[in-house]
Amino acid sequence: MENNKKSQPSVMESDILFVDDNIEKHYGEEFICKEVYFPIYWLVNFLGLPTFQTQKKSGCSKLLKLFLTLITIGPIIAFFIYNIVLTHHYQILSLHWAHSFVYNTLLINAILGVIMYNGIQKFDFFKTFIIKFKDYREMDTCNRRAINFSKTSAMIKILILWIVYISCAIITCTINYTNYEINEEKKITYKISKFFNKQTFFLDTFIIIFANILTLFFISLYLCTYWAIQGETSNFSSQAKRLLDQDCVNARTNLISLSMRHTKLMELVSFVNESLDKYTNILVFHSILITVFSISVVRNYSLAEIGGFEKFEVQLPILLCILVAVFILSPIASSHDNILKDKNTILFNNALFHPYNAELHSISSSMIQRIESATYTGRLVHLIPVNELILPIVVLATIFLSILVGIAPN
């Protein structure tokens, strides 16, 4: 008994910033949910979506969910398939093939968004994430903030993304409506109404804008999740450096506390990346392709001296895709970089290894092994690791493919 008592880590007074007796009241699941997803939370509540609730598993609820899914993406799927049928005769890599590819890919993002959202909600991803996130935050006695990322920065990024995405759809539909007779005469089928004529083009406009809003909804949810993870890895990294480098006297106590939190943090990071990996990778891959083919069309327009809004319509998706890729990949790359910094903080800390202490050495080794062995990042197109180097790799890949594709011929 005496030996057990001696082996218990003593909690220093400096380890605890303050204790909040009402933590459940102020930092409950709903509060955490509002904090993490604040840019989009109002929309979820307004639409009455069960995004942050436990999904019902009954037969009736499954049928209702299937019915709502079909209503949501049914028109978009029909619109997409009809577009493929109308444009299948275009020569691959030609001007109209490349331009219609951009149109179709933006529709695919919305369709896949709904399908994959339903997939992760089968195991209540967002509800589970909030529970795991809340449990992890309660372990942090040095920082009682609910979230560790800037709300202002997040709101600005979401707002920019929504403005550019919606503008992309509105400008495209406006130009196609203005040039409707010309497009009809030249048989540019992907730019005319899929219903009847110019009078019914408003239906096409509605479907295109609705598809973009759907994609934006899912991107916003996933971005908030990634930003929350990035904030936690950054917070943990800075705390680990401060506690281990500047507080050598309490190195043992600090390391034990950090090790417990590190296990939960790595579990949280792994859970998010494994759950959202497929859709975010598809979004990034599609962004690369849209950028490449849009550049090809822009170069054709430049040679043909086509300017004004018609050229701007093709340039805007390039900006959109750059924003999507950067906003998604930046927090993932930053989180990976923070995790690697933790390994360096431990490896280069003399207090943990000199003089030799079996307990400290064991805890340190387990944290390093966890970083090296755990699967906490995915692979883009199953080939490129999504780590701290992913952004320059994506930029180089886009440039290379743009050179390879060249100018889209008429």
Image (cartoon, rainbow, N blue to C red):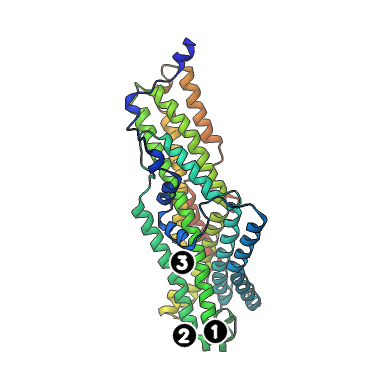
Residue 94 placement, left or right of 222? right
Residue 255 lies, with reference to residue 122, above or below; the image says: above
Q: Amino acid at mark 2?
A: Thr
Pointer 3 residue? 318
Q: Nearer the viewer, residue 262 or 28?
A: 28
* x and y percentages locating residue 132 in the rendered image: 50, 41
Q: Which mark is residue 178?
A: 2
Q: Amino acid at mark 1?
A: Thr
Counting the numbered discs, the total is: 3
Mark 1 Cα shell of 10 Å, populated few (<14), some (14-19), many (≥20)? few
Residue 27 in view of the camera? yes
* x and y percentages locating residue 120 in the rendered image: 58, 52
Mark 2 Cα shell of 10 Å, populated few (<14), some (14-19), many (≥20)? few
Does the residue at mark 3 contact the one at mark 2 (Cβ under 8 Å)?
no
* x and y percentages locating residue 369 in the rendered image: 53, 31
Q: Amino acid at mark 3?
A: Ile
Does the residue at mark 1 contact the one at mark 3 (Cβ under 8 Å)?
no
